[in-house]
Amino acid sequence: MQDDLKSWLDSWQPEVPETTDFQRNVWQRIERQRKARSWLALTIEWMGQPRIAAGLIAVAILLGAVAGSGISSNTQTQNYLRSVNPYAQTR
């Protein structure tokens, strides 16, 4: 039984005809899909990479800390000047 199956499988040939330009059509479809992707989709895909995402998070935290520090320092200075001289003009 196994020999019959093996001989049958060895003799089997697919009957689906392959077109001569099959490979060219495949590459054309791949190229069309690659060109059809928008810049937004490419940017999101690029930012989704672990190294890039970690770097962007680190930069966002750093910028937030710098901005928060500057705002906090400015507010504290204004509060101090108002407590010493309520008529002081602050920027």
Image (spheres, helix red, strand yellow):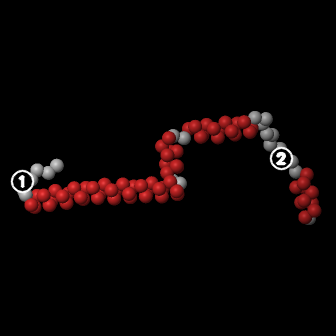
Q: Is residue 32 above or below residue 85?
A: above
Closest to the observer, 10 or 42: 42
Which one is closest to the eye, mark 1 or mark 2?
Answer: 1
**Which image quadrant for residue 25?**
top right
The reply, left or right, for residue 66 in relation to residue 22 is: left
Q: Residue at x 58, y 37 (%)?
A: 35
State which tag comes first along the sequence, 1 or 2: 2
- Give the position of the N terminus as an image quadrant: bottom right
Label 2 sits on what residue type? Pro
Label number found at residue 87? 1
Q: Name the residue under label 2.
A: 14
In x, y percent, where is residue 83? 10, 61
Question: Could you classify mark 2 by the number of other residues whose Cα lies within 10 Å: few (under 14), some (14-19), or many (20 or more)?
Answer: few
Q: Is residue 19 above or below residue 61?
A: above
Label number found at residue 42? none
Q: Residue at x 48, y 58 (%)?
A: 54
Mark 1–mark 2 contact, CB under 8 Å?
Answer: no
Question: Could you classify mark 1 by the number of other residues whose Cα lies within 10 Å: few (under 14), some (14-19), or many (20 or more)?
Answer: few
The reply, left or right, for residue 48 in relation to residue 61 is: right
**Tag 1's secondary structure?**
loop
Label 1 sits on what residue type? Tyr
In x, y percent, where is residue 74? 22, 56
**Which image quadrant for residue 86?**
bottom left
Closest to the observer, 55 or 31: 55
